[in-house]
Image (tube, rainbow, N blue to C red):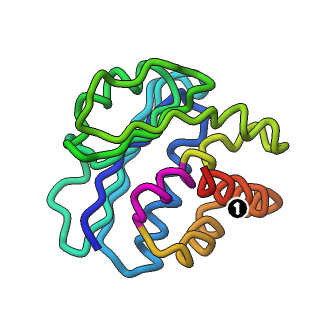
Amino acid sequence: MAEHRFVLSGFGGQGLLFGGKVIAYAGLVEDRYLSWLPSYGPEMRGGTANCSVTLSDEPIGSPLVTDPTAVIAMNQPSVDKFGPTIVPGGVIVIDSALTNTPPDRDDIKVFMIPATEIAEKAGFKVLANMVCLGKLWKETGFCDEASLEPALRHAVPAKHADMIDKNLEALRLGMTL
């Protein structure tokens, strides 16, 4: 499998650090090298939040992703900041329900999906992050599909165990887009 370098970015509270954990745990399930590096502003909710995640078959030199192969951007500041850094041939998944201006590039694959609207209509308003993660998986194949469920089950804290099935449903929904 190739090395995957991701940035998941948006506002705090959108679940992007959690989405990064799911990717990282998928790497653990597959016994791969991984790094997960969160970064967030001082605000608990509403401030900026992003994480860098790398999955590789080789040792990883730095946890900081400066040249992502793929990005999830759930707001315009994230598109503006990380869109230009994606390697040619890379992927960006944008929540078009929250922003509609993609990066001005023709050397990357841009997927505008109304993830927030899709999640709301499906009955899990707060899981747009999982819809985006499902689309990211579909476009990059960052792990075996069979690794996603155990990774997600490991990432969900015990106090939110009742949300596992909804997270899985949102993830699968994103995989169909």
Question: Of 42 and 76, which appears nearest the observer?
Answer: 76
User: Which quadrant would residue 8 be assigned to in this image?
Assistant: top left
Residue visible at 62% across and 49% down? 130
Image coordinates of residue 53 in percent, x first then y, are 36, 53
Residue visible at 57% across and 36% down? 113
Q: Can you say whether 96 is above or below 101 in the image?
A: below
| Helix, strand or loop for the magenta stretch, by majority | helix
| Residue 159 visible from this viewpoint | no
Residue visible at 23% across and 34% down? 85
Image coordinates of residue 36 in percent, x first then y, are 37, 55
User: Which quadrant would residue 153 be assigned to in this image?
Assistant: bottom right
The segment highlighted magenta reads 133-142
Left or right relative to 93: residue 161: right
Left or right relative to 139: residue 123: right
Residue at the limit of the structure toward the left, as seen here:
61
User: Which quadrant would residue 14 be assigned to in this image?
Assistant: top right
Question: From the image, which quarter does the N terminus lie in?
Answer: bottom left
| Residue 131 visible from this viewpoint | yes
Query: Which class describes the residues within 10 Å of circle 1: few (<14), some (14-19), or many (20+)?
Result: some
Residue at the limit of the structure toward the front, as seen here:
106
Question: Of 139 and 146, which appears nearest the observer?
Answer: 139
Left or right relative to 132: residue 103: left
Q: Which residue is identified by label 1?
A: 168
Image coordinates of residue 100 in percent, x first then y, are 51, 19
**Residue type for callout 1:** Leu
Is-magenta flag for residue 61? no
Residue visible at 73% across and 40% down? 119
Image coordinates of residue 160 in percent, x first then y, are 76, 56
Tell me the element at label 1. helix
Q: Can you say whether 97 is above or below 154 in the image?
A: above
